[in-house]
Image: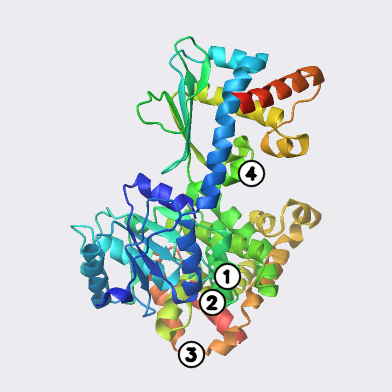
Amino acid sequence: MEHIPVDLDGFNARRPMVIVHPQAKGLVKRFVRSLADSNLSVGALVHCALPYVNQYELERLAGLFRWRQCDSVVAIGGEFAIDIAKALATTLTDGNELKHREIKDRTIPLAYIATQAIGGNEVTTTMNLDGREVISDFLYPDIVCIDNRMVGQKAGLNSTVVAAIGSLAWCVEGVANEQCSPFAEASVLTAIRLIADNLPSLAKRPADKKSALAVVNGVAVAGTVKSNCKGGVACLAAELLARETGHNTNLLAGLLLPYALRYKQERNQTIKDDLLLALTGIDAYSTIAADDRSKESIRIIESLVSLAGVELNQLKIQQYLLQKIAIDVEDISESRVSMDYCLGFLQFVFGDN
Amino acid sequence: MKNYDFPQISPGTKPLKRFYVWLLLLIFGRAFQAVAKVDPAAKQEFDRMPSDFMLDLCVAPNGPHMIVGKDKQGRIRYYGWKPKDKKITLSMKIKHLEAAILMFTFQESSCVATARDRLIVEGDIVVASGVLRIMDLLEVLLLPKFIARLGVKRYPNRTQMSLARKLRSRVLTYARVVVG
């Protein structure tokens, strides 16, 4: 964290506005202590009151930002805290029209300090504004700080596990995606490895800083995959189902993932061996026969997803939604995932329950 | 909107850590001057440096500093901790006080610190590498082996530095650091 003043200084910024996630309230002292003997002073410390970004609040914060002569934005914690920071940094740049989702530039530096309050969208090019998703290259944070002093709290454990499972779903489907950019491909396996290796120990021992740090790091790397790669049927269906039902997108994506892989297997489509390699590492991978690798991958993913402690049938998804979701998935995937395939998949999933 | 809803915070200072780093830089500065006279390898390294060599090793953003350079006769001299009015040719900044503490409590060697992006160098990289080599040599000479091993990448074995040279250079460097 001590690097943040130095890096912000590189942007000629010395007076940030700090947006704090409610779960990260106790971590502010550690952040302030890390600023000692630097030229940086906090212009305004804002504790998020609302769990979403609201246009009125945003204008209020923009006024405060100008009044206190701040020059950069730092978010402590993810989810809506980073969304507010991203919205604030873009709204303060001339020429952007957030109401019309037009982001042409961003001149305000944006730093993100990872805590265990994460939603998976922090280190991506997306943000949630008034319930709508806004995508722009200018939404990627300039500085991402993952520090062991800011993780290892019990409070944010559930959101960390759910975000990690959601990120895992994106990465696993990223491995299978032929159109995935080489840059994202390079990150995919690292993210899967970090999450798969450390999520079980984090769920068992929430205070384990090493695991928490690795999982948060894995989610941050998965953000690069999300920004550069389009999701597969599980992620897209989860996104749309979440919109319809109000359930968590990450949780739905995680729960749908093993079904997506099994559905693929039933249709005799291949599941790449790389997946097992990333999930288990080279030693275990080389002891498993080639024919059993897909099954083993699915088994490991199922055990990881079970850490969320929620079953799909507990979510009570209504059957009448499936047709609509299938049509919408074909639409948003630009026909990469056909309606028939998606409908067959959803019936495979919810027929099981 | 009330002021106390959104507090402004000025960061504090860490006077003890600052003092420790200042003291270490003072000792290192004097040791630079001493080792240039007593150790042949250090002398050779300094000879390769340009005649206007003036090093400012400091902790960003507000110091402390250590100024070491060549005088008109080409001898290495310690010029204190005030960079004002000095013509600095090589500036080596440790990015923040915590990084300096890691380096100067020998929890991190200079190589590891460089790899972890803790140093900013403005000036000739070749000369900066020479300075790091001399710093490693100073750690070997000034510190007991079990501490020095933490501070350098590879502790020199007998073939690289004979026991006689090590003892002679160590005693003379210590004497010159104390006496001047």
Q: Are marks 1 and 4 on the same chain?
A: no
Q: CA distance from mark 1 to mark 4?
A: 41 Å
Chain ID of residue with mark 3: A
Chain ID of residue with mark 1: A
Amino acid beneath label 1: Ile
Name the residue: 64% across, 64% down.
Answer: A209
| Mark 2: secondary structure | helix
Left or right of B83: which side holds A199? right
Taking B53 as reference, is A204 above or below it? below
Taking B128 as reference, is A184 above or below it? below
Q: CA distance from mark 3 to mark 1?
A: 23 Å
Which residue is at the front of the view, A220 or B108?
B108
Which residue has dot 2 on it? A251
Taking A186 as reference, is A346 above or below it? below
Left or right of A224: which side holds A86? left
Which residue is at the front of the view, B65 or B112?
B65
Q: Are marks 2 and 4 on the same chain?
A: no
Coordinates of residue B107 in the picture (x, y in percent): 66, 45
Chain ID of residue with mark 4: B
Coordinates of residue A91 in the picture (x, y in percent): 24, 64
Name the residue: 65% across, 28% down.
Answer: B138
Q: CA distance from mark 3 to mark 4?
A: 62 Å
Q: Are marks 2 and 3 on the same chain?
A: yes
Amino acid beneath label 4: Thr
Mark nearer the viewer, 1 or 4: 4
Q: CA distance from mark 2 to mark 3?
A: 17 Å
Q: CA distance from mark 2 to mark 4?
A: 46 Å
Q: CA distance from mark 2 to mark 1?
A: 7 Å
Which residue has dot 3 on it? A318
Disc 2 or 3, which lies upstream in sequence?
A: 2
Amino acid beneath label 2: Leu
The quadrant of the rendering that contains the N terminus of chain B is: bottom left
